[in-house]
Image: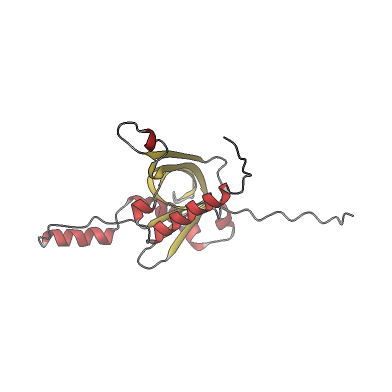
Amino acid sequence: MTTGIPPISPKLQKGSIIVVNQATGIRTEIPFQYNPETLTHRLTAQTTTGDFDRAEAFRIKGPPEETFSLEIEIDATDLLEAADDNTQQMGIHPWLAVLELLAFPPSQRISTNDRLARQGVLEIVPPEVPLTLFSWGTNRVVPVRLNSFSITEEEFDPHLNPTRAKVSLDLTALNYNDLGLKTRGGKAYMTYQKHKESMAKKLPKKSGG
């Protein structure tokens, strides 16, 4: 018996880039307004090196080298219709700035390192960017490094603030060897891998030679 009530559609989960301040734990999330239609995911196995040995044929040294490539859209239309103050004044500049700063050393750290250098300190630790997570559904939240990205700004307000842009992202996964198993990022990667192992067990198994 039909009631005329339309079926309830599941809520669409949006992909996002999450930036985590490792000192404070404060998170800044950039949700994708429209999930991209395609995602290129490339894995390169870390096999053993040297002369071929049958005993080593199935061994791997560690997690694969893993990259993600995708194109996202950032659009101010909804926020402008909601009369959001920041968007009215700056367009999507704040969204783009969060992404762009992933490629910049923090200005405060630059000043600190300059002062240490002038004081004669010989070993100065290079600055770090925040922990960055690529979230593509609950089963795929992985620490990444932003290798490169390009921004195509498509529309502007009267003050030349961008209001719509396409951003092409090239990301490399950071695993527990890169970050340390007990770090926040290392634990996130292990959770990501365990989700893969859990999903792989869902397929029926067949015995055979």
Most extreme residue toward the bottom is: 24
Most extreme residue toward the front is: 209
Q: State whether residue 189 appears in this view.
A: yes
Quadrant of the rendering where the C terminus is positioned: top right
Residue 193, percent across and down? 48, 51
Q: State whether residue 76 appears in this view.
A: no
- Please state which of residues 52 and 13 is positioned toward the viewer in this rendering: 52
- Please state which of residues 138 and 94 is positioned toward the viewer in this rendering: 138
Where is 204 relative to 4, above or below? above
Left or right: residue 205 versus residue 119 is right
- Please state which of residues 149 and 96 is positioned toward the viewer in this rendering: 149
Most extreme residue toward the top is: 52
Quadrant of the rendering where the N terminus is positioned: bottom right
Q: Where, by quadrant of the figure, is residue 38 drawn? A: top right
Left or right: residue 194 versus residue 8 is left
Residue drawn where x is 79% and y is 54% of the image: 6
Residue 95, percent across and down? 45, 54
Colour scheme of the rendered structure = secondary structure
Residue drawn where x is 53% and y is 53% of the image: 195
Residue 117, percent across and down? 14, 58
Left or right: residue 112 versus residue 167 is left
Where is 84 relative to 151, above or below? below
Residue drawn where x is 28% and y is 58% of the image: 107
Most extreme residue toward the right is: 1
